[in-house]
Each structure stands twice: as C-alpha cells, then as structure tokens.
Image (spheres, helix red, strand yellow):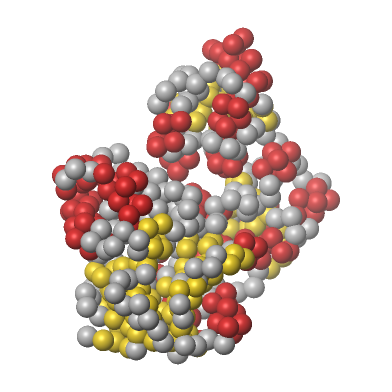
Amino acid sequence: MRIAGIGTYNNIVYWESGMETIQVSEIQVEHFYLSCLAHASYLVSSAAVAAVIDPQRDVDVYLQAAARKGLKIEHIMETHLHADFVSGHRELAERTGARIYLGEGSGAAFPHIAVKDGDSVRFGNCLLEFLQTPGHTLESVSILMTDLGSPERPRAVFTGDTLFVGDVGRPDLSASHTPRQLAELLYRSLHEKLLALPDDTEVFPAHGPGSLCGRQMGPERSSTIGKERRLNYALQARNAGDFVSLLTDSLPARPEYFERDVELNRQGASRLDELPPLAAAGAPEVLRLQSEGAILLDTRPAMEFAAAHIPGSIHIALSGQYASWAARILGLDARIVIVAGDLDHVRESQLRLARVGIESVHGYLEAGITGWMREGYGLEYIPQVSALELAGLLETDSGHVAVLDVREIAEHSDGAVENSIRIPLGDLTARAGELDLDRLVVVHCKGGYRSSIGASLLRRCGMRNIANLTGGFDAWKSAGLPCIPA
C-alpha cells in the first residue's frame, strides 16, 4: 500500500538551538536534540512538504522551523509508543492537519494510519518506507528514506529505539511478551531488516547517551549501518541465543513511569497550553502544603542546594536530566511545589516535567529561598568533601565512614572506591535502610549530579550524617586515588 506521495549533508549546525540540518539532494533532515531527555526527533522535508518523526511534547519547535523554511507539515511518524517521554503527536496533528502514522497493532485511541512492511509515504524527491522492526516494542517500526533522484540505494533509516549508536533498545516494554521473547524478535528485526541495508546507510536513532531505553549508547548523534555492524556491542553476538542472554542478563529494572507514558502516548496527550498556570505560594503556604504531603522540588544548582535548602526538600538540578529523574523518583502523580532561582526557571521546570507526563505541579515558592529566609524559617545544608578529603577520612577513620556509590551497575566497569556500597540512585529510597546510621555516609556518582539527588533523598529519609563527594568518581580518579576493578 502506498499511503502518500517524502535529512542535509552539509553539516550546518545550530548548537545553540539543539538542531542540525543535513542536506540530501532536494531533501533536508533537520535534527532536533533534547539533551535533558537524550531524545532525538527529525523534520524531513522536500518540495515544501515535511514529516516530523518522533516529536517531543512541545511542538512549537517544528512549527517554527517549518514556518522559517516555508514548509507544510503533512505527516507525523512515530517509530513506536514511547515509554520515556510524552509525545506531541496529537497536538501537532491538531495544529497542522497532518496525519499520524504508527506501527500496526499500537492500539492508539486517536485517528492514525497503522503501517506495516511495504507501506510508504512519498513527497517531493523523497520516499519514506516503513519496516516493521519489533523487539523494543511490538509495534516498533523503522523508516527507510530514499532519494528518488538516486533511487538505487536508500540514504538513511530512522531506527527509533530499535538500533542506537553503539546499542540497541531494551526488550522489556510489553505486557504480553517476556524480555527474552522481545529480544528474540529484536534479533530478527536487526539481522533480517536493518543489517540487510547497505553499509553506507545513515542511521538516525531516537535517543542518545543517558536515555533509559539503552545501556551503552555512543555520543555521536548518527552513525551508519556498516559502523554499527562493526562496533555495536550487541551486534557482535554470535547467534540469537547469545544476543538474548546479552540483552536480558542483568537488565536494569524498568522505571515505573514507563507504562504510564506508553498509555499517555496511546491516548494522545493534551495540548501544553491546557496546563494550568503555576501559582506563587509564600513560605507559610508552602510549609502548609509540605505538611499535607506536597514535595518541595528544588531545581537550583547542586552547590546552592548544598549550601542552603528547605528541610525535607528533594534536589534535582534543572541543568541535567531533570525530568527523567523526577519521573523515576517522584512518579507522575506527585504533588509538587517548585523551588527555583527565578520565574524563568520555574517555567522551564514545569515544561520539562510535562515532557515526561508530570502535570500535578501545584505552584512555586514565591521569591525562592530568599523569600523563605525573609519569613524566618530554618534551612539545612549538606557538607561537601573533596576526593582528597575523603581519602584522608578513609585512611584515618575508615570504621566511621561509608562510601555510597549511586551509579548504575554498568558504570562500575570504570572502577570503584574500595569497599564502597553500591546502590543505584533509582533504588536508593527503597534501600536506604541498608545504610548504617552511625557512620558518615559520603555519596558519589560519576560527576556529582546524581549524588546531590541521592544526598537529598537520604536527608529526607531522616539521615543526618551524610556528605556529598564533590566532582564524584571522576574527581577521585583524576586525583590519582586507588580504584578497584568492577
């Protein structure tokens, strides 16, 4: 079935806006990258017509890009129902009149075209063909792009979460199939569909390093089939059995919010402009809300939080993968009051939370920490220790010091501090009872972002004797201090 009649290789880069444009003959691919979610999406255009692939929730970026280039967005393509972020496909369709395409069997509740092998979309000089590539999810598709000016070979393939740079998608996002069953499907999708493509076919995935949908993604934004064939660890498995074991042995736990985001995407999320405006709350009101169960989410930089923060607040800095960690730690239904440096950061916080489906933000602390102090309320701080200071403590008083490593298991291949306690950040609240309250617990991650979150969680659990390792394990290694192998 042919459904309709559709990136620019000159490497014109707009780093400040998170976009990259690639020219292929008459075709352009504009690459949008949200580092806070490690999410990649694409605007593919030819002959003044465009398709958006795997859109983020805030769709104005595509509308603005299309207006700037004089394009009409007629197609919206999802490689699958995403689990780690909320897509803007429904709002984008409402605002443009474009059709939405999803793999057959998605169960989507909104108007869409269900696609399968052999279906295609053509506009201008570009042909987009759908390949069913189940494994990450059952309805996953990849989208093959051919320049009809040179139709002898495809130019690129948009692989969604099936194939990443250096990795493949996690196989545990189905209610009806086990991870081993999904991994078997993924093996066939990779070897029978994607690896059958020419080696010079460009690979454009939906995620980069830091995404929860893979484990060992490389830093490059794109790759080629040949490069992945040679270098991707998952594609080195000798057979299907080895591949299944490689992917499913020690598979990290699936974040609880993934199932909720899939359902939001299956139904189609509401428009962002339907979110209620955030109300300012004075310190007394915030204290009352906190006593009623609201979570104070402090989004300021780590050192500002460490120096002075409201007792019981949770720290997740806006500078990193803020929304993903908020969803993992707080869930999607937490009643949140934002603590930020200024109103712009409050608005940015709300937008990023909405990108993962957190919409129950009650308001924000008026005038921030300054307003809290003005009312005479107390503050807490978390001590910071350097790598050399920690080494000295371990040498002189090791019986009273515990090192808590909150990195993921896969990161331990870089080494670890001897005798450190290893609890991934996502498990920390549930496992805080394993820590000795009589010892100073020094928390560290790779660079300091996650350890600040961890320290705030432990303090909220009632632990007083904690500190944060400044610069994390990177600082420990840079100081030449001893590490043990994983």
Quarter residue 434 falls in? top left
Q: Residue furthest top?
A: 396
Q: Is residue 286 left or right of residue 209?
A: right
Residue toward you, 51 or 13 = 13
Question: Which corner quadrant holds the C terminus?
Answer: top left
Q: Classify residue 99 by image quadrant.
A: bottom left
Quadrant of the frame with the N terminus: bottom left
Q: Nearer the viewer, residue 305 or 215?
A: 215
Frontmost residue, 288 versus 220: 220
Taking 437 as reference, is 104 left or right? left
In the picture shown, does residue 470 fall above or below 122?
A: above
Residue 333 visible somewhere in the drawing: no
Q: Is residue 284 above or below residue 126?
A: above
Residue at horizontal 57%, vertical 78%? 65
At 54% from the left and 12% from the top, the residue drawn is 399
Q: Quadrant of residue 277?
A: bottom right
Vertical comparison of 275 with 295: above or below: below
Q: Nearer the viewer, residue 395 or 397?
A: 395
Q: Residue 21: x, y in percent?
A: 54, 70
Labels in figure, total: 0
Q: Is 211 on the left-hand or right-hand side of 272?
A: left
Is residue 424 rendered to the left or right of residue 59?
left
Any part of residue 223 in sight: yes
At which x and y percent is residue 119? 25, 80
Q: Residue at x 45, y 20 (%)?
A: 484
